[in-house]
Amino acid sequence: MRRIRSHDTSPEMAVRRAVYSMGYRYRLHVSTLPGKPDIVLPRLMKIIQVHGCFWRQHSGCIDSHIPKSRIPYWKPKLERNHQRDAENRRKLRNLVWKVCIVWECQAKATSKLFKRLARFLRV
Ligand SMILES: [Zn+2]
């Protein structure tokens, strides 16, 4: 699928910088893994996905809102994204990868994000 936005969106960069500053090294957009995950730590078998709140329909998030008039257009597209994400997550977990999802609205360089990533990445 063609991605509408580039990979280097600022939420993803914020997460990458946070992970890097904690001393972890990673690979980006690994095409041999299901769904070409954003941030991959092969030695730890851990993956961090940064999801756009609109594109991946962050449930309950204000940024996931679809304007009423645009629902017939967006809903099927976004539902497909959602299904594909769920399928890819399932495949990754079957391959014993651990997956952490960071939503765009959570990807600010705050102490909360750092704590969450540190907890996830700790062996
Ligand atoms: Zn959100």
Image (spheres, rainbow, N blue to C red):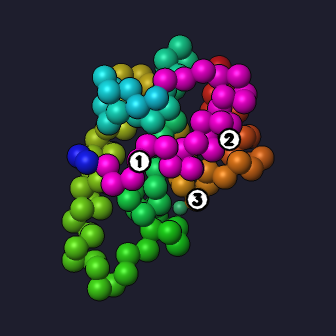
**Of circles 3 and 2, which is in front?**
3
Contact between marks 1 and 2 (CB within 8 A): the answer is no
Disc 2 marks a residue whose amino acid type is: Arg
Residue at image position (27%, 70%) is 74
Q: Is mark 3 within 8 Å of ligand 1?
A: yes
Mark 3–mark 1 distance (CA, rounded to whole Å): 17 Å
Query: Which numbered tag is attached to residue 105?
Result: 3
- Work out whether mark 1 precedes mark 2 in sequence or the reverse, and give the earlier one: 1
Whole-percent x, y for residue 48 in the image:
52, 36
Give the answer, above or below, for where 76 lies relative to 111.
below
Mark 3–mark 2 distance (CA, rounded to whole Å): 14 Å
Disc 1 marks a residue whose amino acid type is: Ser
Query: Which numbered tag is attached to residue 6?
Result: 1
Task: Sort mark 1 into few (<14), some (14-19) or many (20+) by Cα contacts within 10 Å.
Answer: few
Q: Is residue 4 magenta?
A: yes
Residue at image position (43%, 43%) is 7
